[in-house]
Image (cartoon, rainbow, N blue to C red):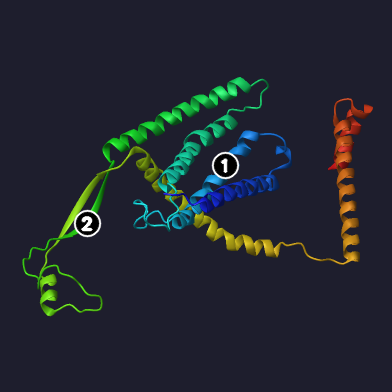
Amino acid sequence: MAVDWFLIVIVVVMAIALLFANVYVLVYFQHDDDKNTAYFPKALVIFGLLFAEGCVLLLPLDVANNSSAIGCAEGWNTACGNLNMDLLWLIVFMAIIFVIVVLLPYSIYYYEADDGEDNVGNRQWLEALKMEIATLAFVIALFVVLYVTVSKSHIPMRALEVNSASLAKGFHTYTDGATLSSTELESAAGIAVQSLSVTLDVSFPIYITGLVSFIGWFGFCIFCGIGLIALPLDLILSYANRPKFISADVYAHQKASICIQKRSIELIELGKSIRSAMERPGGGNKSSWERKKQKRLDF
């Protein structure tokens, strides 16, 4: 079974393009104080966006690969990409779980351990490591307990059982375009339908993927719902507070007003500093009567 190299080229090109796009978004929106610093959190943001984008783009890739079509596993269907999408989906989801459970919490704990004192490098990563070990212990215990107790998948099914020795009522060759006889319709209506449930054991990686996806849907519904509600309001406020054109004379007048106001604030602050210096004991070498008089005038 030959692999479709066109799909492989598409995957590589899209991964590189998404990496460049994520780096551009990070550089564009980063704060000026974060330039040339904090490379690990930046790499975490870039690859986090890449995995999120990969979850979306793997869907059309799976459709283009056509791995679920009849004959792909046997090799006689030439319309298959023959990419192991099951393994690719599993790699992406396991990477997302690793980022969520290990890298993101450790980064948060490392940031929270910074108390602003000097020489805290060793103590900072040690505190973050302790918190991360506790987080891993809780997550692993949760996964193991849930997997041991509820790790079986129950698939509902409907079963039909046909027992007939007659060709008129049983199975026989069907010609395209032919209609069913009344005897066949009556026989089909009399067949009892049984409701069954097939129980399958789920592997541990598949179970973790389903559990994390189930929990993630709650966060998606909450944050996506808030974002969709807030988006129209943000757009309206952005339009109302947009920069507006003003004429040259209005600009000159506002600039002069701002300069005068700024100079007035500076003079007020200077006056307050002079007053505080004069009100200090011995300030200005004034007598007690003069200081009382000055307070009455200031009041």
In this picture, is 147 found above or below 259? above
> Of all residues shown, which one is farthest toward the left?
165
Q: Residue at x 48, y 41 (%)?
A: 96
Can residue 286 be seen from the camera position used here? no
**Which percent across, then down, holds residue 287?**
91, 28
Residue type indicated by callout 2: Met
Number of other residues with Cα within 10 Å of mark 1, as a class: few under 14, some 14 to 19, many 20 or more: some
Q: Residue at x 20, y 72 (%)?
A: 174
Q: Position of residue 65 (x, y in %)?
A: 45, 54
**Of residues 181 and 270, which is closer to you in this image?**
181
| Mark found first going from the N terminus, 2 or 1 | 1
Residue 291 placement: quadrant: top right
Position of 209 compared to 122: left or right? left
User: Is 268 on the left or on the right of 157, as rendered?
Assistant: right
Front residue of 163 and 102: 163
In the image, residue 2 sits, relative to residue 135, either above or below, namely below
The residue that label 1 is drawn on is: 47
Q: Which residue is label 2 attached to?
A: 157
Where's residue 259, x and y in %?
89, 52
Camera-side residue of 198 and 166: 166
Q: Amino acid at mark 1?
A: Phe
Lateral position of residue 170 relative to residue 18, left or right: left
Mark 1, secondary structure of its residue: helix
